[in-house]
Image: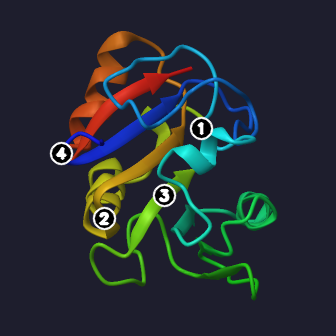
Amino acid sequence: MLAQGKVIISCNSSDFCFFSENLNLTAPSHLSTSGDPFSGKNWRQGSLLPNSKALCIDTPTGEDVLALKEIGVVDSVGIFKKPSPPLIIQGEGRKHPFPGDSFDFEFSGKGGFFEEFVKPAEFAGEICRTLQPEGFLEVHTTARDSYIFNSFLELFNCCELIGTR
């Protein structure tokens, strides 16, 4: 059973990690240093199911949306300042065009250094607003040191860290 509240996975690299191995989200208290829950049978045993609603944040090309759809999460959509239907609708990381508690899973593959995010508190606040209780968030970012990484985590007061890579 999942821990109460929302859960965050933060990747500290800019590589695309939907399809790596070995983390099973059915045990959120387990910290893993490698892997991703959405490959093979692991994503089916975790919380991302074919009937899940997934949001990819600030995705200019929609590759991450397409990847989710290809693994069976058909109710996946991306947001970006310039829409590109049907995969991407207009929206921003700090202003999602959806009501609260809309998504089981949210992904930001924006990459780059956290301290370069524009209005990071608004970005985190929108994720906390639109992510369902016990939903999952995966963010690909890089922090130059532990102080910056911990500052990043503090913005997501709605989440619990379950793993980094």
Q: Residues within 10 Å of mark 4 (few under 14, many from 20)?
A: few
Looking at the image, which is closer to me, 39 or 86? 39
User: Mark 4 or mark 2, which is nearer to you?
Assistant: 4
User: Mark 2 or mark 3, which is nearer to you?
Assistant: 2
Which mark identifies residue 4?
A: 4
- The C terminus: image quadrant: top right
User: Mark 4 or mark 3, which is nearer to you?
Assistant: 4
Callout 4–callout 3 Cβ contact below 8 Å: no
For residue 15, side relative to residue 96 (left or right): right
Residue 24 in the image: x percent, y percent?
Answer: 53, 32
**Residue that label 3 marks:** 106
> Is residue 38 shown above or below 144?
below
Question: Can residue 30 be seen in the rendering of this structure?
Answer: yes
User: Which three-letter amino acid code belongs to the residue tagged 2?
Assistant: Gln
User: Which three-letter amino acid code belongs to the residue tagged 4?
Assistant: Gln
For residue 135, side relative to residue 4 (left or right): right
> Is residue 50 shown above or below 21?
below
Q: Earlier in the sequence, mark 1 or mark 4?
A: 4
Between the residue at mark 2 and the residue at mark 3, the CA separation in whole angstroms equals 10 Å
Q: Secondary structure at mark 4?
A: loop
Q: Residues within 10 Å of mark 3 (few under 14, many from 20)?
A: many
> Is residue 145 shown above or below 62?
above
For residue 128, side relative to residue 25 (left or right): left
Looking at the image, which is closer to me, 96 or 32? 32
**Residue that label 2 marks:** 132
Rendered residue at 59%/76% (across/down): 81
